[in-house]
Image (spheres, rainbow, N blue to C red):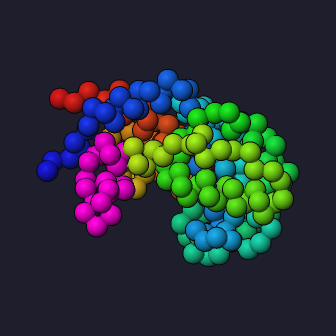
């Protein structure tokens, strides 16, 4: 089957989500486990305008394997604020907004466990988030028989496939901007 299938329901859903005036969040982390923490947060609006961007000092060493992915080192976060010191600013941006995330399950979990670790109240509801990775997977349409669902694609692939000229640099701000542009692309897409 040629890709994308570009199902009209996905395009309609993208247009509905645009109508919510969402914001877009991305994080970089010390890893992917149950005890890993956020070390960078980037948030933009639907037009890619900066709403929040900061490195976060996790209060512990960043594993080399994680640094190889995003390039963030202990030295880079040494003078960065702790999450507990900036959470009020982040929470004010996220409060009562629809939040687009590429791989929402991961970033939502890492933000929540980082906020819990920081000992500050978590106020963001899961139903505020929507997963752009799942939306792109349904639009692209490659079926994963093993998972009985659409096959997930990396953000870099999605951006390149759609011809979006923004980097997927594994820095939170760049990836949040690319995610916002991807929603716009899906909402505006007209199947030939």
Asked if residue 143 lies in the magenta stretch, the reply is yes
Residue 159 seen: no
Would you place residue 46 above or below residue 153 in this image? above
From the viewer's perspective, tell me whether residue 142 is left or right of residue 103: left
Magenta segment range?
A: 136-153
Residue 103 seen: yes
Asked if residue 109 lies in the magenta stretch, the reply is no
From the viewer's perspective, tell me whether residue 189 is left or right of residue 63: left
Would you place residue 49 above or below residue 65 in this image? above
For the point 84% across and 59% down, the residue is 119
From the viewer's perspective, tell me whether residue 68 is left or right of residue 120: left
Residue 137 in picture, x, y percent from top left? 34, 49
Residue 104 in picture, x, y percent from top left? 53, 51
How many circles with numbers are drawn on the protein?
0
Q: Quadrant of residue 187?
A: top left
For the point 54% across and 26% down, the residue is 20
Front-lying residue, 59 or 84 = 84
Front-lying residue, 86 or 13 = 13
Residue 56 in picture, x, y percent from top left? 74, 56
For the point 41% across and 27% down, the residue is 15
Residue 27 in picture, x, y percent from top left? 61, 53
């Amino acid at each position: 089957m040629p890709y994308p299938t570009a199902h009209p329901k996905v395009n309609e859903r993208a247009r509905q989500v645009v109508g919510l005036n969402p914001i877009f969040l991305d994080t970089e982390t010390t890893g992917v486990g149950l005890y890993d923490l956020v070390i960078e947060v980037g948030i933009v609006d639907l037009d890619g305008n900066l709403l929040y961007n900061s490195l976060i000092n996790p209060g512990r060493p960043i594993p080399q394997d994680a640094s190889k992915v995003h390039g963030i080192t202990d030295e880079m976060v040494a003078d960065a604020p702790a999450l507990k010191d900036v959470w009020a600013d982040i929470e004010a941006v996220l409060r009562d907004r629809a939040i687009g995330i590429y791989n929402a399950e991961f970033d939502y979990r890492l933000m929540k466990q980082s906020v819990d670790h920081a000992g500050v109240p978590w106020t963001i509801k899961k139903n505020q988030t929507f997963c752009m990775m799942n939306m792109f997977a349904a639009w692209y349409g490659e079926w994963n028989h093993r998972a009985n669902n659409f096959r997930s694609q990396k953000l870099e692939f999605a951006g390149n496939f759609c011809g979006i000229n923004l980097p997927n640099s594994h820095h939170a701000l760049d990836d949040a901007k690319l995610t916002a542009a991807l929603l716009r692309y899906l909402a505006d897409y007209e199947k030939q």
